[in-house]
Structure formats: structure tokens, C-alpha cells
Image (tube, rainbow, N blue to C red):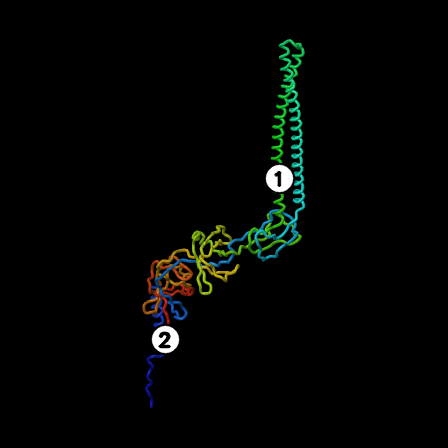
């Protein structure tokens, strides 16, 4: 007996067209939503950093590395050139003020000094000889003056006597005039001797004054020469520690070359390198702080070096108050240098998002914590921990602060929580 075979209404030939149609509709729908809606990206909660915006005290500061240095360093330069003859102390030794450190020898300088000393000795000898001659001449002139005074007195007596006798016509005219002439001659002779003695006195005084001035100048030059010779023995200008000594026996050193330095150990300062970006904002008086052994110490900028080398400039900072007792020369300190006073501000924790957004926008987490939306923001100042939020966020908002490197142009993040 024959049996009627029923046909299958959902055969493969009929199903395939339906599947293709549904796929086409799905593609159209996906395309529509991709072009008309927000682009989304699923992210796992444990692979992103979510931070909460807060309000608190904000201070702009930069971290800098400071090196502990002596409060003062005195450089030792060769005031005179010469050959290193003796070394009195070793590098690193503690020295006292005026303590000899090393000795140079300079034959030319020593010979010049000997010639100067000889010249001064000869000038002094010549001046003494001139003084002796002047004294002898003065004594001779005074002796002549004494003889003339005596002759004048006698001539005057004879003249006065003959004058009376001539009036009484006791003596002749010839005898009278002879006594008068002798008297007048002695008067003129005394006058000439007195003028000569006065002139010799003035000339001798002038000559001696000039010689004294010459001797004084020569002695001053000799003093300078002796000072130059004494500079061949290099002494410590202050008490401290000799460091960086650059001299060995037998070396020839020219004038002005660096021989070493003296570090004054009465205190310390901190020298820091800072990026040139901050050169206009760093000035004398700015404060910083560092922490050692859970205790915070303060520093103050004392000097700013304006020269920029390899994109960085230097500052010297002094301790405010008592420095740490265990601090050592050459020690590195992590200093937080303040660029502003503390103020109240809306704070956003720093994170990798800034590299992709430049601080212009951020993903803000919704209230249910399941999605994060792209919002525009404006940031102000910053320090190593926080950004100052000027617009776009308020305290209590939660945002994604981790890197956005793999997010592309996504407008929305779907946060998948771990089960």
C-alpha cells in the first residue's frame, strides 16, 4: 500500500534565504548605531584606575634632586708659576688657616728678588753717603762762618777805632780807609757764606727727599716681590678640608692654574639642578622641604645661577633652622621645591590619561559605575600628585585616570566588573 510523504516546510533551501536576510538587517542596524550613536568599548574594572575628584589644600611644587655641599668652597689657584717642590699635606686632610699646603720653586722670581734687594741696599747706602757728605759740607761752611764772624768782629773793632783816630787826625787817611775796606770785605764775605750755607741746606734737603722717595718706592716694589716669592708657598686661606688637590712633586704649574680647593666645614648648603622650563618661576626666597628619618626639614633658595647647561640651571639652598645631624657632604636629597602658597582647590589625581588628552577631556564614571562618558575639562596648575581642576568636574566625581592609549576615538567605556 502506498503512503503519502509530507513535504518539510523548513528545508535548507527555504532557511538559508531567511538567515541571509536577518544578517543583512543586523549589519544595517549595526552600521546605523555606529554612525548615529556613541562608540563604545568594553573595559575590565580591574585593568583601569578610577580616582575620585576631591577638594583640599593644593600647593604647586616640583621635585628636584639636591646634592649636599659645604657652605663655602675656596679655590686654590697658583698666584705664581713654578715647579712643585714639596707637598706638606695630603688630599682630604683637615687644615688650619695659614697652614702651608705645598711649595713651588721659581728660579727667575728668586733671582729677581735678590736683584731688587741689592738695588734697595745700594740706594740706601748712596743716600747715607750723601747725607754724610752734606753733614761734612755743612760743618765746613759753619766753621768758615765762625772764622768770618771772628774776622768781622776784629775788622769792626779796628775800623771803629781808626774812625775815631781819623777824626782826631791821629792816623792817616790811608790807614782809616784800609780798616774800612777790611770791615766791608768781611761783611760781604759773611753774607755770601750765609747764602751758600742756606742754599746748600735747601739743595741737600731736596736731594735727600728725592732719594728717600726713591728708596721708599723701591722698598715697596721689594715688598711686592717678597710677597710674590712668599706666594710660592701655598697656604690655606681658611680652616677646612683640602679637596681636589691637583699637584704632584716635579710638576710645572703656570700662574692661575687650579691647585685644589678648601671646603669650609662650618655648615652645608644644597645645590639642585632644575629644568629650564621653571627658570622664570624660581627666585631667591622660595622654600622647599625634604624628609630624612621621618622628619621634615626646610630649605630656602639662596642663589640662582642663570646660566643654562644641557637644558638645566642650578640653585643653592640654605637650611632653615638646624640641619640634620647625620647629613654628609655629597649626599643626595629629594627636595620638594614650592612654586606657590597653599590654597584650596578641586584636585584630580595624576595619571596616564594626560598623555592622550592633554588635560582637555576625561572619561567620567556614571552614577551606577557601569559606564564612563567622555567630558571636557580644564586643568590649571599641577604638582607631582595632583592637577588643579578649573572646569568640568566637581568634588565627588569619579573618573578614569589610567592610560587611554588603546581607547582610540571611543566616546564611552562600558565597565565590566569582575565576577
- Mark 1 or mark 2: which is in front? 1
**Residue 118 numbered tag:** none
Q: Quadrant of the N terminus?
A: bottom left
Q: Dot 2 corresponds to which residue? A: 16
Q: Name the secondary structure under disc 2.
A: helix
Task: Give the quarter of the image for residue 321.
Answer: bottom left
Q: Residue at x 44, y 63 (%)?
A: 295
Instruction: Rate crowding at label 1 as few (under 14), some (14 to 19) or many (20 or more) other CA atoms within 10 Å.
Output: some
Q: Dot 1 corresponds to which residue? A: 219
Pick out the residue farthest to the top: 169
- Residue 264 on image: x %, y %: 53, 54
Q: What's the distance in space between the residues labelled 1 and 2, CA to CA?
A: 124 Å
- Residue 412 on image: x %, y %: 36, 66
Question: Do we see residue 98 in this rendering?
Answer: yes
Question: Do we see residue 355 in this rendering?
Answer: no
Would you say 272 lies left or right of 111 here?
left
- Residue 312 on image: x %, y %: 49, 54
Of 132 and 341, the residue lying toward us:
132
Instruction: Rate crowding at label 2 as few (under 14), some (14 to 19) or many (20 or more) other CA atoms within 10 Å.
Output: few
Q: Quadrant of the C terminus?
A: bottom left
Of 406 and 289, the residue lying toward us:
289
In the displayed structure, 163 sits above or below 372; it is above
Q: Name the secondary structure under disc 1.
A: helix
Amino acid at each position: 500500500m502506498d503512503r503519502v510523504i509530507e513535504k518539510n516546510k523548513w528545508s535548507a533551501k527555504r532557511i538559508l534565504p531567511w538567515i541571509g536576510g536577518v544578517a543583512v538587517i543586523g549589519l544595517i542596524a549595526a552600521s546605523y548605531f555606529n554612525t548615529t550613536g556613541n562608540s563604545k568599548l568594553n573595559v575590565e574594572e580591574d585593568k583601569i584606575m578610577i580616582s575620585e575628584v576631591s577638594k583640599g589644600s593644593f600647593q604647586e611644587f616640583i621635585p628636584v634632586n639636591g646634592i649636599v655641599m659645604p657652605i663655602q668652597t675656596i679655590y686654590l689657584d697658583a698666584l705664581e708659576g713654578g715647579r712643585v717642590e714639596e707637598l706638606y699635606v695630603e688630599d682630604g686632610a683637615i687644615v688650619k688657616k695659614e697652614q702651608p699646603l705645598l711649595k713651588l720653586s721659581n728660579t727667575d722670581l728668586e733671582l729677581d728678588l735678590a736683584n731688587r734687594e741689592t738695588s734697595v741696599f745700594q740706594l740706601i747706602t748712596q743716600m747715607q753717603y750723601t747725607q754724610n757728605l752734606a753733614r761734612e759740607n755743612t760743618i765746613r761752611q759753619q766753621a768758615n762762618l765762625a772764622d768770618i764772624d771772628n774776622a768781622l768782629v776784629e775788622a769792626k773793632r779796628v775800623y771803629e777805632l781808626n774812625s775815631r783816630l781819623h777824626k782826631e787826625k791821629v792816623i792817616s787817611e790811608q790807614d782809616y780807609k784800609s780798616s774800612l775796606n777790611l770791615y766791608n770785605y768781611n761783611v760781604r764775605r759773611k753774607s755770601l757764606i750765609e747764602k751758600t750755607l742756606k742754599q746748600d741746606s735747601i739743595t741737600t734737603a731736596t736731594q735727600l727727599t728725592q732719594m728717600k722717595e726713591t728708596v721708599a718706592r723701591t722698598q715697596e716694589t721689594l715688598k711686592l716681590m717678597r710677597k710674590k716669592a712668599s706666594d710660592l708657598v701655598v697656604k690655606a686661606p681658611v680652616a677646612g678640608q683640602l679637596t681636589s688637590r691637583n699637584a704632584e712633586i716635579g710638576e710645572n704649574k703656570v700662574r692661575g692654574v687650579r691647585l685644589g680647593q678648601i671646603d669650609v666645614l662650618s655648615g652645608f648648603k644644597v645645590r639642585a639642578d632644575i629644568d629650564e622650563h621653571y627658570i622664570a618661576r624660581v627666585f631667591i626666597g622660595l622654600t622647599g622641604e625634604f624628609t630624612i628619618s621621618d622628619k621634615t626639614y626646610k630649605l630656602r633658595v639662596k642663589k640662582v645661577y642663570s646660566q643654562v647647561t644641557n637644558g638645566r640651571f642650578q640653585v643653592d639652598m640654605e637650611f632653615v633652622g638646624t640641619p640634620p645631624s647625620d647629613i654628609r657632604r655629597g649626599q643626595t636629597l629629594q627636595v620638594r621645591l614650592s612654586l606657590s602658597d597653599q590654597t584650596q582647590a578641586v584636585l584630580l589625581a595624576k595619571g596616564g590619561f594626560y598623555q592622550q588628552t592633554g588635560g582637555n577631556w576625561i572619561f567620567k564614571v556614571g552614577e551606577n559605575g557601569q559606564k564612563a562618558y567622555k567630558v571636557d575639562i580644564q586643568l590649571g596648575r599641577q604638582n607631582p600628585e595632583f592637577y588643579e581642576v578649573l572646569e568640568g568636574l566637581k568634588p565627588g566625581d569619579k573618573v578614569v585616570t589610567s592610560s587611554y592609549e588603546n581607547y582610540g576615538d571611543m566616546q564611552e567605556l562600558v565597565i565590566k566588573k569582575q565576577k
